[in-house]
Amino acid sequence: MFITYLLIGFTVAFSLWAFNNPDVIVKCKHWPYAEQRDKEYYRWLTAGFLHGDYMHLLFNMLTLYFFGGFVEQWFTIIFPGVGQLVYLFFYLIAIVAASLATYYRYRDSPSFASIGASGAVSAVLFASILIYPTNSLYLMFIPIPIPGIVFGIFYIWYSSRASQRGGDGIDHVAHLYGAIFGLLFLIVLKPALLLSFFAQLAEWVS
C-alpha cells in the first residue's frame, strides 16, 4: 500500500496547507473558464489534491484508504516490478480524466469551479468493483453491507441524474466520469477482467 499511503499523505498535506493559504485554492482549483481563457491546464491535476473542508478531505481519504490498497495490490500482481508505478499513473490520469469531463461541460461558465480527489477516488472505487463485484461495501450511516455491484449501479445512476440537474455545488460530472474511467482503464489493460466480472456475478446470483 506504499503508493496509496503516499497519495493520502500528499493530499492531506497539500489540502491542509491550502486551508491556511486561500491563494493556493484560487491558483490551483479546477476552473474550466480560466483554463480555457489563460491555458492554465495544470489545474486539471492540482485540483485533485485540494479539498473544501475537513469532512470532504476525510471522506475521500477514507475511501481511498479502504479501496486503494486492494487496487494497488492488483496492479502489483498484474505488472510485477512496475505495478505500483502503473497504479500511480492510473490515479493521476484519473484526476485529469475527471477534470476533462467538467472542462468540456463548463469551459464557458465563469462561475463554475471545483476541487477534490473525488474523481480519482471514484476511479479507484470502481476499479475495485470491477475486480471484485460481489465484495460488500460498508457506508457511513448504513449499518448493513451493500454488494459492490449494487452500490456501483446506484452510484452511476445517481451521479448521472445529479450531473444533469446540477445546482448543489457538487461536481457530479467528475464523480461520474471518474468512475467510468476507472472501469475503462482496467478493461483496456486486462480485457479478461470482463469475463471474470460476469462470472463472479453469475455465481453470486445463482
Image (cartoon, rainbow, N blue to C red):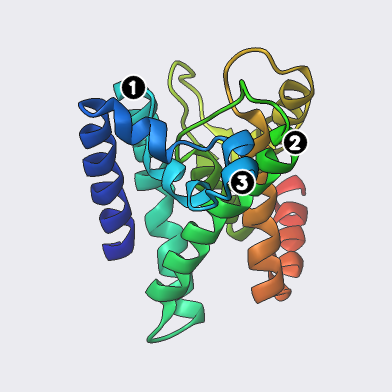
Residue 116 position, x and y percent, is 45, 35
Furthest residue to the bottom?
81
Q: Which mark is residue 98?
A: 3
Q: CA distance from mark 2 to mark 3?
A: 11 Å
Mark in the foreground, 2 or 1: 2
Residue at 67 percent across and 56 percent down: it is: 183
In the image, what residue type sits under mark 3? Ala
Residue at 77 percent across and 55 percent down: it is: 202
Q: Which mark is residue 105?
A: 2
Mark found first going from the N terminus, 2 or 3: 3
Q: Which mark is residue 53?
A: 1
In the image, what residue type sits under mark 2? Arg
Instruction: Assign a secondary structure to mark 3.
Output: helix
Q: CA distance from mark 2 to mark 1?
A: 25 Å
| Mark 2 vs 1: CB contact within 8 A | no
Instruction: Assign a secondary structure to mark 1.
Output: loop
Q: Is residue 139 above or below residue 128?
A: above
Between residues 130 and 167, which one lies in front from this camera angle? 167
| Mark 1 vs 3: CB contact within 8 A | no
111 left or right of 82?
right
Mark 1: few, some, or many residues within 10 Å (few <14, many ≥20)?
few
Furthest residue to the top?
167
